Image (cartoon, coloured by chain):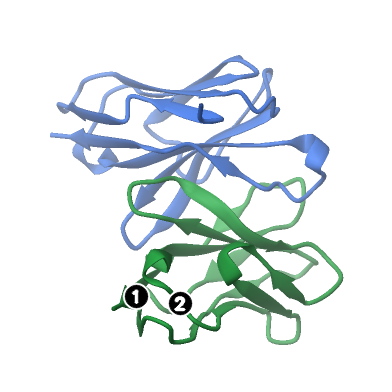
Amino acid sequence: DADVTQTPRNRITKTGKRIMLECSQTKGHDRMYWYRQDPGLGLRLIYYSFDVKDINKGEISDGYSVSRQAQAKFSLSLESAIPNQTALYFCATSDRKEGATDTQYFGPGTRLTVL
Amino acid sequence: AQSVTQLDSQVPVFEEAPVELRCNYSSSVSVYLFWYVQYPNQGLQLLLKYLSGSTLVKGINGFEAEFNKSQTSFHLRKPAVHISDTAEYFCAVSKGYQKVTFGTGTKLQVIP
């Protein structure tokens, strides 16, 4: 079984709909992240959480919200989806016990299309 | 703020030929440097990382990278590529206990 799972893997939705992307991990890591990947732009950080009570905005948080329901679960919501949120979304984890290196472990991604 | 530049968006190379993927970073303090690989339809996985010590870092699948502080570079190399190396490669930098900044990626296309 994969250590970092994301659901759904693919989603097509319409403008204005509320969407939730879910991430679960069995690695026991305390830190979790949400990124979006767009062609030519690499990965950009949306939100990150260093533990259950810690939520931080990344560089492109507008239009998104997150919830850290447990150490193992971190969900990303689009309150009112718009077409320019069409992208590939990745969840990642890292382990504070690995030190300050912040090596990231990625899920398989969710491809979201907003029509 | 830290940043990463990958100048080459695509690199075509023939099978069994050597390859170098370039990465330059900017930071005023010591950093940790990473290369991640993304195979088609998959998430990213760590290829190698530089934390400290020897400037030549060896990773998985025969890749290696050299940290050059004076040139603020961390180029990735492989002496002979295979078809299975076709993927997108991301350079990344972190200053420790802070979020990682990724480059825009380089697509390596290995030609049979």
Quarter occupied by residue B13: bottom left
Considering only vertical position in the picture, is A3 above or below B11? above
Q: Position of residue B76 (x, y in %)?
A: 58, 75
From the viewer's perspective, is B42 left or right of B35? left
Check the residue under mark 1 and report the chain it is in: B
Looking at this view, name the residue that lies furthest to the right. B53
Nearest the viewer among A87 and B1 is: A87
Q: Residue shown at 56%/75% (left/top)?
A: B23
Report the residue marked by disc 1.
B110
Considering only vertical position in the picture, is A27 above or below A35? above
Considering only vertical position in the picture, is A50 above or below A85? above
Check the residue under mark 2 and report the chain it is in: B
C-alpha separation, residue under disc 1 versus residue under disc 2:
7 Å
Which color was chain B given?
green
Report the residue marked by disc 2.
B81
From the viewer's perspective, is B36 left or right of A12? right
Quadrant that contains the C terminus of chain A = top left
Q: Residue shown at 72%/71% (left/top)?
A: B57
Q: Position of residue B111 (x, y in %)?
A: 29, 78
Chain coloured blue: which letter? A
- Circle 1/circle 2 CB separation < 8 Å: yes
Q: Residues within 10 Å of mark 2 (few under 14, many from 20)?
A: many
Q: Residue shown at 65%/75% (left/top)?
A: B65
Q: If you read the primary sequence from the N terminus, does the residue marked by circle 1 or circle 2 appear first?
A: 2
SS at mark 2 in the image: loop
SS at mark 1 in the image: strand
Q: Residue shown at 37%/31% (left/top)?
A: A63
Nearest the viewer among B19 and A61 is: B19
Looking at this view, name the residue that lies furthest to the top. A69
